[in-house]
Amino acid sequence: MNTSMCILLAVALTTVVSCRDNSSDDSFAGDISAASGEGNEGAAGSPVGEEPVPVPPDPPPEEEPAPRTDIDGLPLPDLTTEHDYVRYLEARPRYYTATTSPFGNVRSQDNTPFSNPVNNAGAKLGRVLFYDVRLSANSTISCASCHIQRHGFTDPAQFSTGFDGGKTGRHSMSLTNATYYEPKSFFWDERAATLEEQVLMPIQDPVEMGMNLFDLEVKLAETSFYAELFTQAFGDEAITSQRISEAMAQFIRAMVSYQSKYDQAFAAGEWNDPDFEAVFTEQEMLGHKLFSGFPVGRQASLGCIECHQTSAHTMDRSHINGLDADTSGDPGAGGGFFKSPSLRNIAVGAPFMHDGRFGTLMEVIEFYNSGVQPHPNLSPDLRRNGSPTGAPVRMNLDQEEKEALVAFLHTLTDETFLTNPMFSDPFAE
Ligand code: HEC
Ligand code: HEC
């Protein structure tokens, strides 16, 4: 403890003592009457030596954040902090925004419709909705219960738990880079034609949130703050499901990840430039080459990038990667075709695949290495010689190469994105 703190403490203690003196003066009067009531005069004047030692006052109540509740008794968000989503998107690196890019055109994959571009007021409202438990029938869960920021907006549970304790039929999907999917469709089986359509579906899903949209509009109108948020975003107070959908889609489309180690390498130089390689370890660089299908020594091209395309690592369309020979149990988009979310932040997104069957990235790599099944519609990219009728590919990777692929996938983890306040829970502030 330094001197000035000692002085402060001494002053504080003196104050405490004098306070106690005053208060014991007050109670002294009470003591007299009590004492005189007992007819014992002597008790009134206790000897100085027996003065009770002043007890320090109770510490101020623990800084337990008072539960911030709104007039409906449910949580109240922090609305004072403004985030600039538009600037965040404008700061995307060139290979995200240019029409020519070393691993393919990312920009053309963007599914943002002209009718609903991201703007700050819309994404701000979308963020509050995304984290609001009011969207579920019993006000217990929000979208973020199953799409958790530090996991790249997926769920570490194999199947997620809905509002009433039920389990989802598939693993939750990462929302990282959701804006980059050219077919525009959403879900593992692509059943939602657009993101605007998709975001209203979990709300009404009988397992996930169990709410109906009419009740939701009424429920949101009974708060103190949504009217203003809708006014900022759409010009007037009307709370409609279309506006709810547009705002949430804007928030999700702002979730672009571009500050991983992989991006640092790009910032240093072109992919075939020594400065690019210098950012990566040798192991990560080997993994990058294997992933991207560059020849490395004896190993022929792997071409993960044939399906997980471009620097945004998203798909061009759904594919069959041979998880099962028979996909009639879950045919996905039909015939066993599935969409994969972007592989950005994949290392924090376990478990993997639509049914969360793999717990680690090494299991995923081992699957592609030796476990691809002979499905009739298996992609030629995963068949021997790329032939449409060939047997499932056996990559024959050695341990070093498998570990290199895992190491490369870790370079896609973007800590800035995973902790960025603009994507965090406004109800927790
Ligand atoms: C109970 C858990 C749960 C809740 C709550 C939930 N989701 Fe999901 N989400 C999932 C699961 C599981 C999937 C994959 C389902 C499938 O494909 O059949 C998914 C898929 C998605 C996708 C598709 C991503 C893609 O690339 O195709 C989006 C977008 C999404 N959810 C957004 C939301 C939004 C917005 C909310 C809140 C309105 C929400 N989710 C609430 C579990 C949940
Ligand atoms: C023929 C296209 C294709 C190729 C080639 C391919 N994948 Fe995939 N990948 C998919 C599909 C389709 C899925 C989703 C499958 C499902 O869940 O049913 C997927 C899923 C994944 C996932 C899990 C994603 C998640 O969110 O759970 C990872 C990780 C992955 N692939 C890595 C790789 C790697 C590494 C390679 C190269 C060794 C590779 N993929 C090659 C099509 C492909």
Image: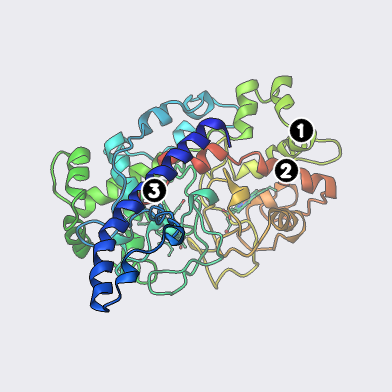
Q: Is residue 332 visible?
A: yes
Where is 355 relative to 126, above or below? below
Q: Are marks 1 and 2 in contact (CB under 8 Å)?
A: yes
Quick one: SS at disc 3?
helix
On whether ligand 2 comes within 8 Å of the CB at mark 1, the answer is: no
The mark closer to the camera, 1 or 3, is: 3
Q: Residue under label 2, please give it.
A: 407
Q: Of the residues shown, which amino acid type is indicated by label 2?
A: Ala
Dot 1: within a 10 Å radius of its alpha carbon, few (fewer than 14), some, or many (20 or more) residues?
few
In x, y percent, where is residue 401?
A: 80, 45
Q: Residue under label 1, please give it.
A: 281
Q: Are marks 1 and 3 in contact (CB under 8 Å)?
A: no
Quick one: SS at disc 2?
helix
Q: Residue under label 3, please give it.
A: 16
Quick one: SS at disc 1?
loop
The reply, left or right, for residue 148 in relation to residue 118 is: right
